Image (cartoon, grey):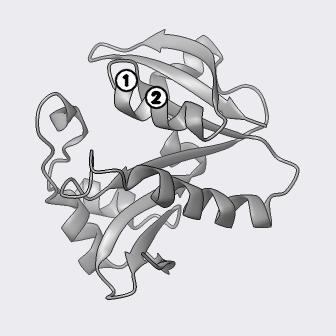
């Protein structure tokens, strides 16, 4: 699968907002609101498309990739590039995650050679945590919100 990074467009953002994941991953389902659309269009999100220009997933960096409650626990104090990501639910759990993540991590590392990367993942998402460990991430911190427990993982 050949992948490319695109600027986020309103059409792509709308597609993402309508994605629906099966339980227990429905935690990642979005509400289709003007506010959600504005978030995806805030400049920190990029779309990942395949050679047929089909939307495969997205990634974001910076504050958009952080869980706001984590700040009160100090998990975002160190200078890292924070990343968030999502993949089309029709592609999840079918062995596509490694190639998807390797692709966009390569893009990020090319332009940010000496800055380590951090991500935040829901603790229940063992499938994603295994993938991130295969990609060289290690667990760093844990914290809780009203809705879930999270952990941060870093890759140096």
Quick one: label 1, few (<14), some, or many (20+) residues within 10 Å? few
Q: Residue at x 25, y 39 (%)?
A: 28
Q: Is 146 situated above or below 103?
A: above
Say if residue 82 shows up in the picture. Answer: yes
Q: Is 81 situated above or below 45?
A: above
Identify the disc placed on residue 75.
none
Q: Is 47 situated above or below 37?
A: below
Say if residue 67 shows up in the picture. Answer: no
Of 128 and 26, the residue lying toward us: 128
Element type where label 2 sits in the image: helix
Quick one: label 2, few (<14), some, or many (20+) residues within 10 Å? many
Q: Indicate the position of residue 6 as horizontal and vertical percent values.
A: 47, 80
Quadrant containing the N terminus is: bottom left
Identify the disc placed on residue 129.
2
Q: Residue at x 46, y 21 (%)?
A: 69
Q: Is 138 situated above or below 32?
A: above
| Label 1 with label 2: CB-CB less than 8 Å | yes
Quadrant containing the C terminus is: top right
Q: Indicate the position of residue 99 as horizontal and vertical percent values.
A: 49, 59
Most extreme residue toward the right, as rendered? 114
Q: Indicate the position of residue 129 as horizontal and vertical percent values.
A: 46, 28
User: What residue would you read off at disc 1?
Assistant: 126
Element type where label 1 sits in the image: helix
Left or right of residue 1: residue 135: right
Q: Residue at x 63, y 56 (%)?
A: 105
Q: Quadrant of residue 136?
A: top right
């Amino acid at each position: 699968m050949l992948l490319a990074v695109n600027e986020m467009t309103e059409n792509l953002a709308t597609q993402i907002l309508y994605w629906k994941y099966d339980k227990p991953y429905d935690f990642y389902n979005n509400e289709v609101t003007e506010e959600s659309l504005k978030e995806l269009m805030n400049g920190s999100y990029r779309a990942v498309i395949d050679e047929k220009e089909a939307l495969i997933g997205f990634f974001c960096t910076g504050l958009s990739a952080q869980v706001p409650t984590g700040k009160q626990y100090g998990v975002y104090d160190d200078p890292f590039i924070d990343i968030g990501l999502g993949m089309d639910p029709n592609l999840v759990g079918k062995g596509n995650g490694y190639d998807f993540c390797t692709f966009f991590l390569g893009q990020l590392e090319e332009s940010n050679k000496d800055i380590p990367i951090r991500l935040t993942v829901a603790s229940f998402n063992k499938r994603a945590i295994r993938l991130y460990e295969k990609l060289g991430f290690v667990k760093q911190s844990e914290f809780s919100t009203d809705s879930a427990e999270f952990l941060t993982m870093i890759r140096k």
